[in-house]
Amino acid sequence: MITKKVIYSLLFLSLVSFGCKEAKPKEEKVKQPNILFLFTDDQRGGTIGAMDKYNVQTPNMDQLVENGTSFTNSYILGATTAAVCSPSRAMLMTGRHYFNIEPNVYAQFAFNKEDKGKSDKLTFPEYFKSNGYTTFATGKQHNGEPWIERGFTKVKSAFLGGMTRHFGTKVKDYTPETGWSEGYKDDEKFSSEVFADAAVGFLDSYKEEKPFLMYVAFTAPHDPRTAPQEFHDMYPAEEMAVPENFKPQHPFEIADDHIRDEVLAPFPRTKAIVQKEISDYYAMITATDTQIGRILKALEASGEADNTIIVLAGDNGLALGQHGLLGKQNVYEHSVSVPMVFVGPNIPKNEKNGALAYLHDIFPTLCGLTGLDIPDSIQTEDLTAVIKGDEKEVRNSMFYAYNSWPGEGYKPKVNNHGGHRAVRKGDFKLIVSSKKDTYNYQLFNLKNDSLELVNLYDDKNYKGIKEDLTIELEKLIKEVGDPADLSKKEFGIFDNPEDYNFKK
């Protein structure tokens, strides 16, 4: 029999239990990680002190390497134009191979100003903005104003173009509410400092609950290499080591071997000229590293550092005397390799990962690291499983391509611009170069010959490897949508100019 005393006791316990449930703290919604993207211009892969490859001082980039995962085999796919950074950035933004960004990048990202920036392909700032991120940009924007307007909620000190002087860089601001400001400049400040000022200002004033995505795109170490003098003083030219694969000139005629980048110094190259180029290049990198340090310090002061994914990358490499070249209009390792470092929550520290990676893997990888679905428009790979150690690789071969752009007024009968196609698989890399009526073939063992000095193509001992790489190259050409035909002069690229929106 249940007595009143028992009923009262049960009622009391029920009320206590109910009260305890009410008193339980509410679970706070976990905030999505912020993203800080640090992007350099013409910084070759390995030009970070902590990568132990080149004697350049980068204490702040070193810290990122030590706090995160670095890819030691990270590359760009290539370019359609001597302005390599433009298609490179278009691929980064969209996660697509440059053959498949409409209107085609042969026109859109080079000389056809009417079409420039009109691609409707989804960009990563646009995608993260649609998923609740406040998006901010500063620095070099090289793919047209429409992409900037679609992708960013705030733009401060944006440089709209490919290259410029580093003191007195003309920049603009933008918000959807105010539109674009008039251009302005500061003749006293180095470009990297101008962009760091904008980034630090954003971090210092950010009070929103929403996560942020910051895209900080430096114009350094692109020429003209005019860093503040104190950084040039750190690298006396006569003390710079000349690369082992230095040559006075390239051993055979190749695409764009007399393009703007290549005529920055006379032919033949001398060791003294190359030493000066390297000295100025390192000064630019160190000067920019100093400004990166300011941004990282501001991130720490904001209290958001522990919940921020930091990506450090570059848009293409540079020869600087290797193989007798100065520029990036080729597919040698020095010109297609780029730094790529990921730092942040649950990302392994001080890891140097040798998996093959493209710069435009960054879009899907940021989706993977933040838990967002990868858009259907993406054509490249998510590196998240590789970063976390769940997978060894996402690909076992790499494709590289370069074709020069003849510019407006192009005449189809003039087929002498040249191009390259290349494939890397395992330790070996095959390069096919076409110029005028001549083909040249190079086969390198990158494990034993990372500087690409010993051409094994005619060595009968490598016949099987050569055949395997040729088959792989043909397969990858089709997979990425490249119209190149390796049996045709200039790869047949200029046989059908209408395929590229060429202005005739």
Image (cartoon, rainbow, N blue to C red):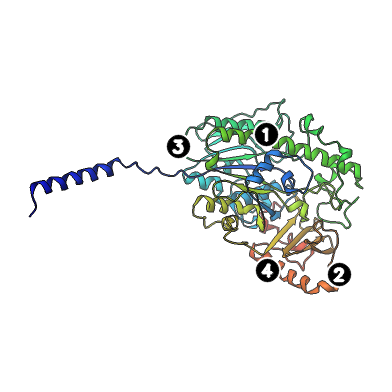
Instruction: Give neighbour class at mark 2: few <14, some 14-19, many 20+ (Cα, 10 Å).
Output: few
In the rendered structure, which amino acid carries the disc numbered 2? Asp
Q: Earlier in the sequence, mark 2 or mark 1?
A: 1
In the image shown, does 313 or 56 lie closer to the viewer?
56
In the image shown, does 117 or 413 lie closer to the viewer?
117
SS for dot 2: loop
From this view, report whether residue 120 is shown above or below residue 201: below
Residue wearing tag 2? 458
Tag nearer the camera, 3 or 4: 3
In the rendered structure, which amino acid carries the disc numbered 4? Lys
Give the alpha-carbon distance from disc 2 to disc 1, as whole Å.
48 Å
Residue wearing tag 3? 209
Residue wearing tag 1? 291
Measuring from the top left, give residue 323's x and y in whole percent: 85, 53
Residue wearing tag 4? 475
Residue occupying the point 89% across, 57% down: 251
In the image shown, does 474 or 295 lie closer to the viewer?
295
Query: In which quadrant of the rendered image does the N terminus lie?
Result: bottom left
Q: Earlier in the sequence, mark 4 or mark 2?
A: 2
SS for dot 4: helix
In the image shown, does 109 or 398 lie closer to the viewer?
398
In the rendered structure, which amino acid carries the disc numbered 3? Glu
Tag nearer the camera, 4 or 2: 2
Residue occupying the point 77% across, 68% down: 487
Measuring from the top left, give residue 262's x and y in whole percent: 83, 46
